[in-house]
Image (cartoon, rainbow, N blue to C red):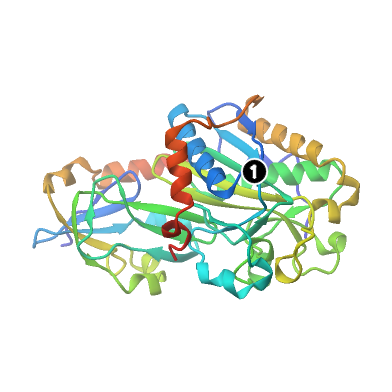
């Protein structure tokens, strides 16, 4: 796998006429609330015409399913019995949340990065690969050849290797086919806005084994163990640079806990109708 | 000669048929942009749809996209074979890759959609 090209990485992306990145770092929340907050962020991005992002955790630890993953599939995995489950509006495979950092990035569909799915993946993931490279970790994005050469287990996101996923090559991460995936993303594309979810796996979850157990960034690149927050900060700066504007880190929350619309949305994500839609 | 198509900005096409129904599909440009389609969810016959609102969803490897009704009305036909043969969308997007048929409540809504030239211009602007 070739080493990424940090300087030229952004050159292939469409020019963006909008400046900057606005980021919130929200506290951990339950699955339905997180999904509702992401939906609200997407609507805000559409209304404001800005690129908005929120970073968050999960309380309690939760399994999120992709928008169309069959609910029954989770029953095949006894190690997930009893876990809270939520279904995302975005695509992709299941993620066990608890030792990851989740992001939601939303931008207007008319934004240069919103027109084709791969452009937004490339923008977000390239910035992360560059930051890891800057810190001496040889990460790379999955290319088309690797994406088709690694079997797809069909359930967990971090067992899949799709085009653009960020992996740490096997030579660094150990004998893992296709390398260790540490960042994966998936989108929901609406008429006026694109919502991209992603999960940065920080460390292996201690309660899981088997197919659902995946090494995280600090397990693979031990030197980064205490620096993950700096890695994230550098990633955000690079992303803002690619957008051609400042990084604005907001204080407070991205959401208003008393907002009745947000509560309504969270209630919808908690229903069986949504959770078992397929 | 094939009937002219109209297009929504969200990349669905619509064509008024002789029987007064409107056939709806997804433009070749949108199908190509989505790449690697894996799943599609369509409405049942009889479902009411509203212009500009979602009537179904389509999933590619890493993205889920809503499908928007170009006109209001009632779903009177569904291409039920499509979810099992998604490659048809790319192979013949304006023929056997049709998605639904709508009995429109107001056929004049078609006139509010983009004609071929306007849609080509839209695609051209999005491609640059």
Residue found at x 9% / y 58% = B20
- Seen in the picture, residue A30 relative to A255 is either above or below; the reply is below
**Could you say where residue A273 lies in the image, as x and y percent from the top left?**
41, 59
**Could you say where residue A230 lies in the image, as x and y percent from the top left?**
81, 36
Residue found at x 49% / y 58% = A67
Name the residue furthest right. Answer: A223
> In which quadrant is the C terminus of chain A drawn?
bottom left
Residue found at x 27% / y 67% = B95
**Could you say where residue A49 lies in the image, as x and y percent from the top left?**
47, 29
Q: Quadrant of residue A260?
A: top left
> In which quadrant is the N terminus of chain A drawn?
bottom right
Name the residue furthest front. Answer: A82
Q: Can residue A230 be seen in this view?
A: yes
Q: How many labels does the image show?
A: 1
Q: Badge 1 is on which residue?
A: A124
- Disc 1 is placed on an element classified as helix
Lateral position of residue A8 relative to residue A263, left or right: right
Lateral position of residue A159 relative to residue B127, left or right: right
Lateral position of residue A237 relative to residue B77, left or right: right
Q: Quadrant of residue A238?
A: top right
Q: Which of A109 and A64 is in front in this view?
A: A64
**Could you say where residue A26 lies in the image, as x and y percent from the top left?**
64, 35
Q: Is residue A113 visible?
A: no
Lateral position of residue A267 relative to residue A173, left or right: left
- Seen in the picture, residue A106 relative to B58 is either above or below; the reply is above
Name the residue furthest left. Answer: B19
Q: How crowded is mark 1: few (under 14 residues within 10 Å), some or many (20 or more)?
A: many
Chain for disc number 1: A
């Amino acid at each position: 796998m070739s080493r990424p090209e940090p300087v030229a990485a952004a050159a292939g992306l469409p020019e963006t006429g909008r400046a900057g990145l606005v980021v919130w770092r929200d506290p951990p929340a339950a699955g339905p609330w997180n999904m509702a907050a992401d939906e609200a962020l997407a609507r805000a991005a559409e209304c404001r015409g800005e690129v908005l992002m929120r970073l968050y955790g999960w309380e309690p630890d939760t399994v999120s399913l992709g928008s169309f993953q069959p609910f029954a599939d989770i029953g095949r995995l006894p190690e997930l019995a009893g876990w809270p489950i939520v279904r995302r509006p975005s695509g992709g495979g299941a993620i066990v949340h608890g030792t990851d950092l989740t992001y939601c990035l939303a931008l207007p569909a008319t934004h240069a990065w919103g027109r084709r799915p791969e452009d937004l993946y490339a923008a977000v993931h390239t910035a992360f690969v560059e930051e890891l490279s800057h810190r001496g970790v040889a990460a790379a994005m999955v290319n088309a050849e690797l994406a088709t050469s690694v079997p797809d287990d069909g359930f967990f996101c971090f067992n899949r290797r799709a085009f653009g996923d960020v992996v740490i090559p096997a030579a660094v991460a150990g004998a893992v086919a296709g390398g260790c995936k540490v960042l994966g993303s998936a989108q929901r594309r609406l008429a006026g806005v694109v919502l991209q979810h992603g999960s940065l796996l920080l460390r292996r979850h201690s309660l899981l084994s088997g197919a659902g157990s995946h090494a995280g960034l600090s397990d693979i690149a031990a030197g980064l163990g205490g620096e993950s927050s700096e890695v994230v900060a550098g990633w955000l700066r690079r992303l803002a640079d690619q957008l051609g504007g400042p990084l604005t880190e907001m204080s407070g929350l991205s959401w208003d806990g008393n907002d009745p619309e947000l509560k309504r949305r969270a209630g919808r994500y908690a229903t069986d109708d949504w959770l078992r839609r397929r | 000669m094939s009937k002219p198509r109209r297009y929504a900005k969200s990349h669905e096409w619509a064509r008024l048929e002789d029987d007064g129904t409107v056939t709806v599909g997804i433009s070749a440009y949108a199908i190509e942009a989505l790449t690697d389609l894996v799943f599609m969810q369509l409405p049942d016959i009889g479902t009411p749809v509203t212009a500009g609102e979602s009537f179904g969803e389509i999933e590619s490897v890493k993205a889920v996209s809503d499908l928007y009704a170009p006109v209001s009305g009632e779903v009177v036909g569904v291409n039920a074979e499509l979810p099992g043969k998604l490659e048809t969308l790319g192979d013949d997007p304006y023929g056997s890759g049709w998605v639904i048929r709508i009995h429109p409540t107001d056929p004049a809504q078609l006139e509010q959609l983009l004609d071929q030239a306007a849609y080509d211009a839209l695609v051209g602007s999005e491609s640059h």
